[in-house]
Image (tube, grey):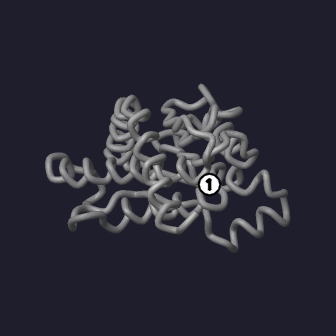
Amino acid sequence: MSLDAIYRQQSHELQQLLARCDHLGLPLQSLGELLVSSWKQHGKMLVCGNGGSAADAMHFAEELSVRFNKNRRPFAAIALLDPTVVTCAGNDFGYDAIFERQVEALARPEDVVVVMTTSGNSANCIRAVDMAKKIGAKTVSFLGKDGGKLKGVCDVELLVPSPVTHHVQEVHKVLFHALCVWLDEISERWAVGGGQ
């Protein structure tokens, strides 16, 4: 199969999947409202993931904390992916603890902890959610496939119904970019405390 044909096939598959994800607008709205409420309370978003989802977590956090399409107030968002912290926690406590340890250190009840895992079975993401719940922070999952062990666990769930990992990640990007468009639009109509 030619690269052109592969591209057209992949594009068609993604279009079909997006059509099956219209229902995710409602939980996405819930995520947006959770974040706005958190920021108004001087809270923050903490986000994590592995591999491609780690890259997506960093992408998501920088869109919020720096800018998206226009200059507006920065929103407090941190990706839990500093390599020195990750490797230290992995070395001292094991890879399953790399996000849990940071959530324990950084999360407060007014915060939102977001995990991105296409399988829903990443042990380090599950443990991050468990720790967030102990602290009293809100929890959000970006999932794929059948949701895995995290299905039904978080306060807000964005489950992309596809077994194809890269398509799940592509839809995750569409979701958080839509959220960023919305935040750009509403950011001038409400005040986040702390002199921002």
Residue 86: image quadrant is: bottom right
Total residue callouts = 1
Q: Amino acid at mark 1?
A: Gly
The relative height of residue 30 versus residue 195 in the rendered view (above or below) is above
Name the outermost residue toward the left: 189
* Coordinates of residue 64 in the picture (x, y in percent): 37, 59
Name the outermost residue toward the bottom: 84
Q: Which residue is mark 1?
A: 49
The residue at the point 69 percent across, 34 percent down is 148
- Left or right: residue 110 compared with residue 190: right
Label 1: which secondary element? strand
In the image, 16 versus 177, the foreground residue is 16
* Coordinates of residue 39 in the picture (x, y in percent): 35, 48
In the image, 191 versus 27, the foreground residue is 27
- Left or right: residue 51 compared with residue 190: right
The residue at the point 49 percent across, 53 percent down is 9
* Coordinates of residue 153 in the picture (x, y in percent): 61, 28
Name the outermost residue toward the top: 152
In the image, 71 versus 172, the foreground residue is 172
The residue at the point 31 percent across, 45 percent down is 40
- Left or right: residue 80 compared with residue 30: right
At label 1, counting other C-alpha atoms closer than 10 Å, the crowd grade (few under 14, some 14-19, many 20 or more) is: many
Q: Quadrant of the C terminus?
A: bottom left
Q: Quadrant of the N terminus?
A: bottom right
* Coordinates of residue 110 in the picture (x, y in percent): 46, 41
The relative height of residue 171 versus residue 87 in the rendered view (above or below) is above
